[in-house]
Image: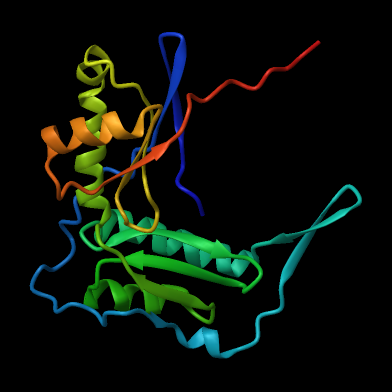
Amino acid sequence: MHRERVVRLLLAGALVMTAPGCATGDDADPSQPAGPTGGWRTAGCEFNHPPHFTTLGTRRLPATPPRLTAAMERIDRGGRERFADSFAGLEVDQAGVRAIVYRVPSAAFDTFIRNSAEDNCVVVRDAAHAVTELTEWHDRVVADLPYWSAQGIHITTVGSRHDGAGVEIGTLDLEATRREFRARYGEEAPLVLVEEGPVRPLSTGR
């Protein structure tokens, strides 16, 4: 699953922002020990899961099996609502018939993932940053957009990475933006800068 995008028009261009969820993770127990680092797999990965396909016209396309979709929805919802200090995001590997969950190691969240997966294959991988932290940085950068515009720094997209690597910032001028962001947010800010132009609305044509 790629990061979801909410499009808002800004003057003549467009800015893409991802709001990663507003949960605070208060239900998670901070006294719980960390889960295993380096990642792990659920028991369902030991079984063979045939690929799932759907037909679109004359094309046969890979699809996510309903049981795996349901497990991913449980994990995503629980991660955002109860374990936002650990959960970073997830994606689906349709060819491998498995989900991949990114999280800051947490024994409590790992137990939740294991129970939610049932007999599906879920691969759990380490993440550097969780939803709670990335939401704060996302909102801070979005709130600063008028400031950056006044400084001549053109930000085209803002979106949290589903792998927890950071908040991805699209910009037309990487070097200038990197220099100014370091000065304002510091060297350790979890901000990933990429060169990306403004989102253009699809033309319907006539």
Quarter assignment of residue 157: top left
Q: Nearer the viewer, residue 165 or 53?
A: 165
Residue extending farthest to the front is: 175
Residue 135: where, in percent of width, then height? 25, 43
What residue lies at 43% left-to-right and 82% top-to-bottom? Answer: 41
Residue 184: where, in percent of width, then height? 12, 32
What residue lies at 53% left-to-right and 84% top-to-bottom? Answer: 45
Q: Is residue 139 above or below residue 47?
A: above
Q: Is residue 23 visible?
A: no
Q: Is residue 130 visible?
A: yes
Residue 81: where, in percent of width, then height? 29, 54
What residue lies at 65% left-to-right and 22% top-to-bottom? Answer: 202
Quarter assignment of residue 180: top left
In the figure, is residue 114 to the left or right of 32? right
Residue extending farthest to the bottom is: 46
Residue extending farthest to the left is: 31
